[in-house]
């Protein structure tokens, strides 16, 4: 695997292998010295044209835990604000010797353009491109589900038969797209729930089912409910009457969360709009995996960097084992 652009590109075996490597990386994060020498001498550039907290910081931490040199570059405060193009920015960073470029961009397809145009030989990791995909978010979500469901026996397992209901702004959600493809590959049953205005055209071709009534979806007792952020910044007109009406019909409020089976997980990729798509009771309940997802993000991003930059493709044995596993 040279790049990670989309979960559609991942086979089931590749996805399970990445989740297994992430298990090893999580063990490193529990050590007193949370560091491996594996990527010593490699340079990882975080190239963020859109705001981020979780993805940017966790990629930086992941690269540092693997002993890579890390440069974090935000469009704000860089020559991008003077009009420098993606091509010139990428070539400039490539000239400085980047081995991996982690890119977040407002344009769908930006990561693919970087990977395919030959402007850089670096491995490209899509950290969110417009409304298209956010593959490492989906991987960390799958990792979190697998951990809650299978616990210490998670290694080697997929998510066969797990019922996942994704609720909210599907139209603008790269998280939803990446999750639908990855979860389907891993054997999960994915159901989407949203107002009709927030369901994308062409959704019939996705490996998922669609509904419009959140209460009906709850009656089916899903194993996982994943709430999505309302992405107001991408909305150029009204998709629902008002926020109160949205929360009443499609929000995970206190009454709905009380009706969920005890074992149902509540997920949210963050950042959350509390009181809109999710209540504080739901977000802070024992069911909520919101902070587990953040912690999983570091392990999963370590796994992705390891896989792309060492090119072993050999799975978990070498990820933290003898030779690479000693603390730096
Ligand atoms: N989930 C997610 O991508 O969060 P950030 O925008 O904070 O990176």
Image (cartoon, rainbow, N blue to C red):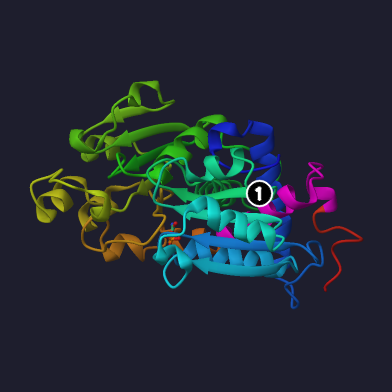
Rendered position, 100 above or below 112: below
Q: What range is drawn magenta here?
A: 296-318
In the rendered image, the residue lying farthest to the left is 241
- Where is the N terminus found, in terms of image quarters? top right
Q: In this figure, which residue is indicated by the disc labeled 1?
A: 120
Quarter, ligand 1: bottom left
Quadrant of the rendered image containing residue 40:
bottom right
Residue 160 relative to residue 100: left or right:
left
What percent of the width, then of the height, locates residue 64?
A: 68, 70
What percent of the width, then of the height, locates residue 321?
A: 86, 58
Q: Which residue is at the front of the view, 121 or 128?
A: 121
Quadrant of the rendered image containing residue 281:
bottom left
What percent of the width, then of the height, locates residue 291?
A: 47, 64
In the rendered image, the residue lying farthest to the right is 323
Residue 57 relative to residue 225: left or right:
right
Rendered position, 115 above or below 88: above
The kind of secondary structure the magenta stretch mainly shows is helix
| Residue at 42% from the left image edge and 42% from the top image edge | 108
- Where is the C terminus found, in terms of image quarters? bottom right
Quadrant of the rendered image containing residue 278:
bottom left
Q: Which residue is at the front of the view, 223 or 12?
A: 12
What percent of the width, then of the height, locates residue 263?
A: 44, 49
């Amino acid at each position: 695997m040279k790049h990670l652009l989309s979960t559609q590109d991942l086979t089931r075996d590749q996805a399970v292998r990445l989740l297994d490597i992430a298990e090893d990386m999580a063990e490193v994060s529990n050590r007193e010295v949370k560091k491996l020498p594996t990527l010593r001498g490699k340079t990882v550039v975080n190239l963020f044209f859109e705001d981020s907290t979780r993805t940017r910081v966790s990629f930086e931490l992941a690269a540092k835990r693997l002993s890579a040199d890390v440069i974090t570059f935000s469009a704000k405060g860089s020559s991008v604000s003077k009009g420098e193009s993606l091509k010139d920015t990428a070539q400039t960073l490539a000239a400085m010797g980047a081995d991996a470029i982690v890119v977040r961009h407002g344009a769908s397809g930006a990561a693919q353009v970087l990977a395919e145009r030959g402007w850089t030989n670096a491995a490209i990791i899509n950290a969110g491109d417009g409304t298209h995909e956010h593959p490492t978010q989906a991987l960390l979500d799958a990792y979190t589900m697998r951990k809650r469901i299978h616990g210490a026996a998670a290694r080697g397992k997929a998510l066969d038969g797990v019922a996942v209901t994704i609720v909210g702004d599907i139209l603008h959600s790269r998280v939803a797209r990446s999750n639908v493809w990855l979860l389907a590959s891993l054997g999960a049953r994915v159901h989407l729930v949203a107002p009709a205005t927030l369901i994308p055209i062409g959704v019939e071709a996705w490996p998922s089912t669609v509904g419009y009534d959140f209460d009906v979806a709850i009656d089916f007792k899903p194993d996982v409910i994943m709430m999505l952020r309302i992405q107001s910044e991408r909305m150029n007109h009204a998709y629902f009457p008002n926020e109160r009406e949205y929360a009443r019909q499609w929000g995970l409020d206190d009454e709905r969360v009380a009706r969920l089976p005890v074992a149902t997980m509540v997920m949210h990729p963050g950042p959350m709009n509390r009181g809109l798509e999710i209540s504080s009771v739901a977000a802070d309940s024992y069911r909520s995996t919101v902070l587990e997802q953040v912690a999983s993000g570091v392990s999963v991003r370590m796994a992705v960097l390891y896989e792309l930059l060492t090119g072993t493709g050999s799975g978990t044995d070498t990820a933290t084992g003898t030779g690479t596993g000693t603390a730096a």
